[in-house]
Image: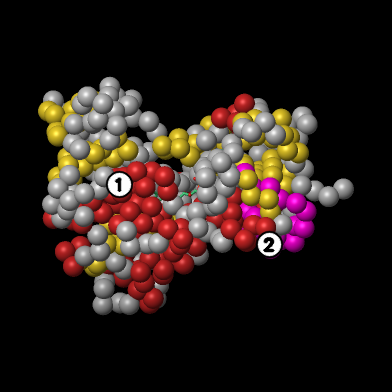
Amino acid sequence: MTETIVIIGAGQAGAQAVISLRAEGFSGPITLIGDEAYAPYQRPPLSKAYLMGTFERARLFLKPESFYADAGCTLIVNTAVTAVDRATKTVRLSDGRALSYSKLLIATGTRVRPIPCPGAGLSGIHSLRSIADVDGLQAVFRPGKKLVVIGGGFIGLEVAAVAAKHGLDVTVFEAMERVMARAVSTPISDFFAIAHRAAGVTLITSTGVDGFEGEGAVSGVRAGGKTYPADIVLVGIGVLPNVEIAAAAGLECKNGLVVDKYCATSDPAIFAAGDCTWHQGRGHGEDEGNWMRLESVQNAIDQAKHAAASMVGKPKPYNEVPWFWSDQYDLKLQIAGLAWPGDEIVVRGEPSARKFSVFHLRGGVLAAVEAVNMPADYLVGRKLIGEHAKVSAARLADTSIPIKNVVG
Ligand SMILES: Cc1cc2nc3c(=O)[nH]c(=O)nc-3n(C[C@H](O)[C@H](O)[C@H](O)COP(=O)(O)OP(=O)(O)OC[C@H]3O[C@@H](n4cnc5c(N)ncnc54)[C@H](O)[C@@H]3O)c2cc1C
């Protein structure tokens, strides 16, 4: 009997799964179902060049629409999967239809974490995850407007950088002591804080927001006992995994849908990939096999490839080096590996030159690199991390030794 594959979530991982299933030789029907109005698109430009207005909308789409039909994939947009019935191997759609599957891939991603503050329902309070969100934000992005960004993570800071360049008056609130604290080391946080302040952004750390003021539309943000005027608010305080339909179907969920190294759930017919998964990461030393949820293009693409291989009976363990990037002003931050508290930190280069890298050593082995405008450091670092290479801290710090010769 012909196998049928259904994919829930027409995003980065869903699109990659279609590509990889065909590359792996799967020839049966594939149905890709998404609740957004669009074919799968890439999100990273949304808070960077696309918001800036320097990246055409057509370039957001991961594949031309004709690709899906040509690949024998039925793409259903504007339609949510509302339930998975594992006993009958069917999914129920928001338009009332039911579709059968032989194998199911759950690639539902995440949604924006709502801010639990009084006044959060006022107009003028935005978040940024989708094309529709950027359309709403761009319409009000005007020079001189007061923008308050809540959350000094990647998305909040990327929006702050674009807004500052557009001539908006930008204030960023970060509840933690430093920006991007969950994802980068202190030297990188400190460097980006200086860069934002130099660009005219008011950056207020260790300060959470207590509420919003305004009648109908937001006019102020209450924080630290004061009210800050605001025409526009951008909330970027993280995301929540979309696992409700998986949990309702009885699949184990923690901070994401639990999958093994083959992207398989506890149901042999159901796999998962991307931002929605809770999985064991690659690592070494103390972090070997740690459970995590990653929000990155790399993880979405690589897990989709592994899930596709598993679905066609060619499982390969997922053991990829995580990588990520962020663009703020003229600064390209590239990260590979996962930093860990207690790592030995080595700075290579001069932050004041706006070109430097931070390397993380664990027991002398390179575990992570964070490179600012240093693509060679990032690329070499990523390769060495993959090889679990031992690297001398002194040689890493010595910029007279070319990075490619650092393991000598
Ligand atoms: C503004 C922004 C900037 C980013 N920048 C970077 C970056 O610089 N570098 C980087 O590596 N990563 C970045 N990311 C993260 C990256 O985009 C995500 O990690 C990636 O999109 C995850 O892919 P995914 O397929 O798991 O989820 P998504 O791409 O989010 O796709 C999931 C899709 O499933 C849909 N869906 C959910 N539930 C259902 C349902 N029940 N039925 C049907 N459809 C459903 C969702 O609406 C969504 O369309 C950024 C994200 C955002 C929002």
Q: Which residue is mark 2?
A: 70
Can you give x and y, in whole percent of width and height, for residue 361 in the image? 37, 57
Query: Dot 2, crowdedness within 10 Å: few (<14), some or many (≥20)?
Result: few
Identify the residue at image location x=64%, y=57%. Answer: 68
Left or right, residue 88 beside residue 9? right
Kind of residue indicated by mark 1: Ala
Nearest the camera: 232 or 356? 232
Can you give x and y, in whole percent of width and height, for residue 47 in the image? 35, 51
Nearest the camera: 346 or 378? 378
Q: Which residue is mark 1?
A: 139
Nearest the camera: 196 or 382? 196
Query: Dot 1, crowdedness within 10 Å: few (<14), some or many (≥20)?
Result: few
Image quarter for residue 172? top left
Q: Is residue 13 magenta?
A: no
Identify the residue at image location x=64%, y=49%. Answer: 75
Can you give x and y, in whole percent of width and height, for residue 155 in the image? 33, 47
Magenta region, residue range: 17-33
Q: As drawn, which residue projects farthest toward the top? A: 118
Kind of residue indicated by mark 2: Asp
Identify the residue at image location x=31%, y=49%. Answer: 138
Between marks 2 and 1, how big is the CA–CA gap? 36 Å
Q: Mark 2 or mark 1: which comes first in sequence?
A: 2
Left or right, residue 27 beside residue 408? right
Does 297 sit above or below residue 397? Answer: above
Identify the residue at image location x=78%, y=31%. Answer: 88
Q: Please say which color scheme the image uses.
A: secondary structure
Q: Are marks 2 and 1 in contact (CB under 8 Å)?
A: no
Does 221 sit above or below residue 74? Answer: above
**Foreground label between 2 and 1:** 1
Image quarter for residue 226? top left
Q: Is residue 18 magenta?
A: yes
SS under mark 2: helix
